Image (cartoon, rainbow, N blue to C red):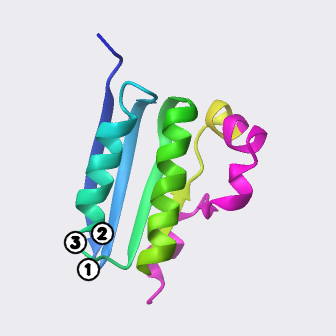
């Protein structure tokens, strides 16, 4: 049985969804995560914050789903912001240089205070 990925969401303000991930975003869970993101994106929100702080593992399949979500955000006109994860997760993002492509923050509350 694959290690679980727990995906929780809340709406801290109208038009903004926060998605909190706990566990492993890997091949076993990446496509279920992607389907969940597509469902959230279909609500036509202006901001999606994906909190990576609870992740314990991130592999190439998970990275690909994050990049796909970023591409959809750019095409669709909403903002996707990732909350920096722990050292292991950040090392993966830095090694692949995706930390330069994806919008990242250590202060997600700042984005929730901003008006569009």
- Residue at the farthest top position: 1
Say whether residue 107 is magenta: yes
Residue neighbourhood size for the residue with mark 2, other residues' Cα within 10 Å, grouped as few (<14), some (14–19), many (≥20): few
On screen, residue 18 above or below 95: below
The residue to which callout 2 is attached is 12
Q: What's the mark number on residue 43?
A: 3
Secondary structure under tag 3 reads: loop
Total count of labels = 3
The residue to which callout 1 is attached is 14
Secondary structure under tag 1 reads: loop
* Residue that appears at 27% across and 50% down: 36
User: Which of the 4 quarters of the picture holds residue 92?
Assistant: top right
Secondary structure under tag 2 reads: strand
- The residues bearing labels 2 and 3 have C-alpha atoms spaced at a distance of 15 Å
- The residues bearing labels 1 and 2 have C-alpha atoms spaced at a distance of 7 Å
* Residue that appears at 29% across and 79% down: 15
Q: Nearer the viewer, residue 68 or 9?
A: 68
User: Which of the 4 quarters of the picture holds residue 17?
Assistant: bottom left
In the displayed structure image, the side of residue 59 where residue 9 appears, left or right: left
């Amino acid at each position: 049985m694959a290690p679980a990925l727990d995906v929780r969401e809340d709406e801290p303000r109208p038009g903004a969804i926060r998605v909190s991930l706990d566990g492993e975003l890997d091949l076993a869970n990446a496509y279920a995560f992607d389907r969940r993101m597509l469902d959230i994106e279909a609500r036509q929100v202006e901001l999606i914050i994906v909190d990576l702080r609870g992740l314990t593992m991130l592999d190439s399949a998970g990275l690909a789903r994050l990049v796909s979500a970023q591409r959809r955000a750019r095409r669709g006109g909403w903002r996707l912001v990732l909350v920096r994860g722990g050292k292991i997760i950040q090392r993966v993002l830095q090694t692949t240089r995706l930390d330069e492509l994806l919008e990242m923050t250590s202060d997600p509350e700042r984005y929730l205070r901003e008006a569009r």
